[in-house]
Each structure stands twice: as C-alpha cells, then as structure tokens.
Amino acid sequence: MQDKVSSPVIVALDYDNAEAALAMAEKLDPALCRVKVGKELFTIAGPDVVRQLVSKGFEVFLDLKFHDIPNTVAAAVRAAAELGVWMVNVHASGGSRMMKAAGEALEPFGDQRPLLIGVTVLTSTAPEELAEAGVTRPLREQVQALAALAKASGLDGVVCSAQEAETLRAECGQDFALVTPGIRPEGSAADDQRRIVTPAQALEWGSTYLVIGRPITAAPDPVAALEKIIAELGS
Ligand SMILES: O=C(O)c1cc(=O)[nH]c(=O)n1[C@@H]1O[C@H](COP(=O)(O)O)[C@@H](O)[C@H]1O
C-alpha cells in the first residue's frame, strides 16, 4: 500500500467545511501525498467527505483518535474500515484490551483493512505538561511505554513526535509505522505544537509518515509549499 504514493507526506485537511477541504484536495495529487480528515472536518462534514476523498483516489487517514470502552472503539474502527480509509487511529492510553478489540474488528477486512495506529503523547504536549494529567515519568519514557504497549497489542504503528522516532525505530523495528505530526519546515511558526522537527530531520530520525497541516494549507501557495517539502525530502 505504501508504494502507491511517492512521498511520506500526509496533508492534514483541517477545515470547517467540506467545500474548502475538497477544493484543497482538488489541487493535490493522490500519487504524491495522502490526506488526513480530523475531528473538525469530520464533525462538520461527516463520512461523505471521507467517501469523496477516497473516490478521488486518495489514501485517507481518518484521525478521530478513538478512546472509549473496547466494544465502542471496535465498532468505530469497523465503521472507519467500511468507509475505505487507509489509516485509522486510537489513543494507546486506552489500553491493551481496547487496542486488541480494535485490531480484531479489522480482521474481516483482510488485505483491505486500514492501518491501525496508536497515539502516544500528542505533539502539542510539552514535557512539563504531562504531570498535570498525573503522568510522572519523563515524556520520552511515556512515549516508549505506550509504543511498546501498542506494538504488543498488535497495532501497525504509533503517532509520536519525530523527536522520539529514532528511539522508537530502534525499539519497535523497521516494520512499525511511525506517524509524526508536529512537522515544521525551517522558519515556520510552531503554532500550538511543542515537539517540532523539520521534514528532512524527521525522515532521518526514522519517521515513516509526516503529517503536515498549516505549513501547507495556510501557505500563500499550498501546492508550492508541498512541492518544496517533497523536493527537500528527495522523494
Ligand atoms: O493524530 C494526529 O494526526 C495528531 C497527533 C498529534 O500528536 N499531534 C498532531 O498535531 N496531530 C494532528 O496533526 C495535524 C497537525 O497539523 P499542523 O500543526 O497544522 O501541521 C493536526 O490535524 C493534528 O490534529
């Protein structure tokens, strides 16, 4: 599946209406990048926008970060697979029983099943913020522990910052997908992100996929911004 698209870039279509998201998708080439539908767009536009992107030939990452009781998450992940998405995610902190239930729900889809990915610690979280939620071990250890739990629960990979990619690549092996948001080309604003890495550095450290939103979608010329990133990656 990975070979269908020539770059590791996933463009985050974070829009408040389907028309804007589809207009951006119209400018993008599904052979060059993938697209992500997240909570804002899905809440306003629903599954139709996902179906439209799939029918335009895009591999779609449905980023709804499910975190609920195992039965509910399994059903939600199954519904995502029925939409034909390429990747779907859950919070790894939901635990092994939840993640295993999600994996089992995808088994009937065989080769057509989406990649199932666990979110470790959000890239907007700064190390000093973890304690607020009662997590007292260092952020890097928390990411490593959740990635190990996701792998042991049968997931295909994790969402993490590229700052942790080198460690996780060594610990989780070559076949474990490392999906890294918080990507910022040199000189772009960090916005609300806290653990940021440039695109080239992220790949060097072992990221499999780079999730990029505002540096592309808020650029004066989004296609030029995407092409510049892809050229810098040499992909
Ligand atoms: O799962 C995600 O995609 C995700 C996880 C994470 O830890 N951090 C993170 O930023 N994201 C998503 O990645 C995208 C990043 O967008 P930009 O900050 O605009 O590049 C947003 O759609 C976030 O919802």
Image: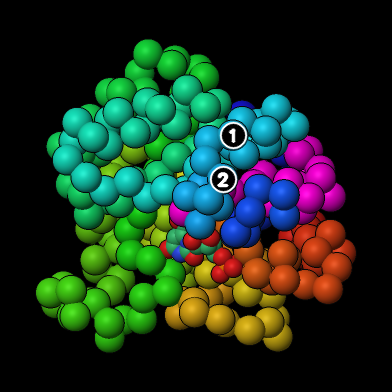
Are discs 2 and 1 less than 8 Å apart at CB? yes
Residue at (55% x, 26% y) in the render: 84
Image position of 26 with respect to 145: above or below: above
| In the image: residue 74, left or right of residue 63 | left
Give how far across and how far down residue 156 sits, in percent. 40, 38
Query: Residue 48 got which mark?
Result: 1
Residue, disc 2: 45
Q: Residues within 10 Å of mark 2 (few under 14, many from 20)?
A: some
User: The N terminus appears in which quarter of the rendering?
Assistant: top right
Q: Secondary structure at mark 1?
A: helix
Q: Secondary structure at mark 2?
A: helix
* Amino acid type assigned to the residue bearing label 1 in the image: Asp
Residue at (72% x, 49% y) in the render: 19
Image position of 75 with respect to 174: above or below: above
* Amino acid type assigned to the residue bearing label 2 in the image: Ala
State the separation of the CA atoms marked 2 and 1.
7 Å
Q: Is residue 167 visible?
A: yes
Residue at (72% x, 71% y) in the render: 218
Q: Nearer the viewer, residue 43 or 89?
A: 43
Judging from the image, the colouring scheme is: rainbow
Give how far across and how far down residue 93 sits, in percent. 22, 54
Classify residue 154 by image quadrant. top left
Q: Which residues are magenta?
A: 21-39
Residue at (49% x, 77% y) in the render: 193
